[in-house]
Amino acid sequence: MTEHLGEVRKLQSLLEISQALSNAIELETGLHRVLELLERLLRSGDLGRPLRSDELDRDDERASIVLRRDDESIAIGTPPDVARRVIDTGKSVVEGGLCCLPITVDGRTHGALSVHVREDLDRTQRFARVVASMIGQALKVQQLVEGERQRLLAENQSLRRELKERYDFANIIGNSGPMRQVFEQVTQVAPGATTVLIRGESGTGKELIAHAIHYASPRAQKPFVRVSCAALPETLIESELFGHEKGAFTGAHARKKGRFELADGGTLFLDEIGELSLATQVKLLRALQEREFERLGGTETLKANVRVITATNRALEKAIAAGGFREDLYYRLNVFSIFVPPLRERKPDLLSLANHFLARCAREQGKKIKRISTSAIDMLVSYHWPGNVRELENAIERAVVVCDGQVLHAHHLPPTLQAAEPTDSRVTGTLDEQTAAFEKSILADALKATRGNCAKAARMLGTTERIVGYKLRKYAIDPLRFRA
Ligand SMILES: Nc1ncnc2c1ncn2[C@@H]1O[C@H](COP(=O)(O)OP(=O)(O)OP(=O)(O)O)[C@@H](O)[C@H]1O
Ligand SMILES: [Mg+2]
């Protein structure tokens, strides 16, 4: 009968051991619990006649677990000296009252489990083997989870790097005066937590600038969260921003975190802020002033540690005058403002932007397009770009799709651009004017092909470098422009 009870207690302990191993998030915590259970069982005599305390140097010598990882090892209890040999050889040591067993994962030894009894070592050993193999299983699961965690971590880091790269200054094209000023402002404002208002026409690159500020700030490792104030109906925007508790309104089936919470420690980018309703403006103002807010239907007050960047293409001052935008909120948002100029005011950037998009689209579409023809460049330059950089990006993308050679020509560009009257019209004018225009385009094409090398261009055209130099000065063509 006692024998039977002992068996039941052993089974019970095995179950508890397996639970301890599978429930613990940290394997080490689980192992401590396993050892407690083992010691309890050893003291009860269910595994074999136990050692008395006075027969041990230390109480925790009754059972111990040691694991070796890379070059560190963790010991729970006091492992016997033979444990090291067991780990090195992978062979059990059973002698005297001691049984020391290897803990293995896929045939490789990662640790040792030892138990100390007075008698009945055989019975003890059978039980200990089961426990050792359970620990091995737990170790394997942990290794798999750790592997997956490392993989996710690596993936996360590479995605971050990609994002950072994408929004790196180097990928924001612009060397014109107005763009340099924008970069300077970004550099000035990025390090702090100042609220920034970005203004500019549609498609000028406001979102790009918002990202650049975030990735150049100390918050770069924290989230960048964007909310488009125009995309959501008024009823949803508040819950989107501040979150809601379960049952806050019909359809609120579960608690949801708002963007303010999700951006914690990072940057919250409120795009198209001019579209926000007056009611939501009040709530936003409070969140910005007091740096606190509540979820919809909630009572808990949450702290907002976010840097706020907003953008709009609307004249907020007019909206204020018309009563559509709160003046106090405007002052809160307009602490530091950056104006992104329209593309027509930074024509010097046009060619580098076009080349940047050409390179990217060609790479994406697997095409080898080397350059943009002079006539196509002229067409790009003379267009007024109401849709700004986005329109240029789309135009180039479309042109790359239809282009089947190595040169992107004017006829590849969208019809909207074709219809526009080029500034230096080539088909009208006096003979001299038309000849000059033709000569200019020949020179430009040759310089494009030779990447701005005048000597090569001269050879290509069967003339001398001196003549090419003279003509370039005459037409005010800078060969350096073709270097890139
Ligand atoms: N200076 C630049 N260099 C490279 N790409 C740019 C630049 N400016 C804008 N772009 C590209 O042009 C597109 C439009 O930019 P973005 O979305 O930032 O404009 P926006 O001002 O936010 O427009 P909207 O007001 O319509 O929301 C994006 O694909 C962006 O990557
Ligand atoms: Mg935008």
Image (cartoon, rainbow, N blue to C red):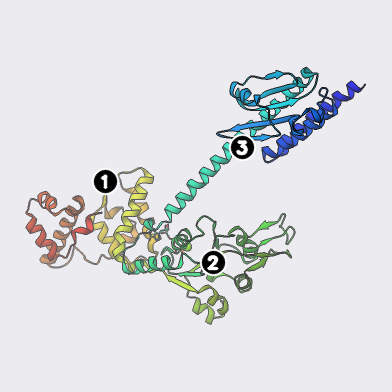
Q: Which residue is mark 3?
A: 145
Sequence-wise first label, 1 or 3: 3
Residue at horizontal 11 percent and vertical 65 percent from the top: 431
Type of amino acid at the residue the image marks with label 2: Val
Residue labelled 3 has its Cβ within 8 Å of some atom of ligand 1: no
Q: Give the SS element for disc 1.
A: loop
Is 163 on the left-hand or right-hand side of 365? right
Label 1 vs label 3: CA separation?
50 Å
Within 10 Å of disc 1 (Cα), the crowding (few <14, some 14-19, many 20+) is few
Percent across and percent down for residue 380 are 29, 61
Q: Is 378 above or below relative to 96? A: below
Quadrant holding the N terminus = top right
Closer to the camera in the image, 425 or 243: 243
Q: Nearer the viewer, mark 2 or mark 3?
A: 3
Q: Earlier in the sequence, mark 2 or mark 3?
A: 3
In this view, the mark in front (1 or 3): 3
Res 237 → quadrant: bottom right
Q: What amino acid is labelled 3 in the image?
A: Val
- The residue at the point 47 percent across, 58 percent down is 215
- According to the picture, the residue beneath numbered tag 1 turns out to be 406
Coordinates of residue 231 in the picture (x, y in percent): 56, 62
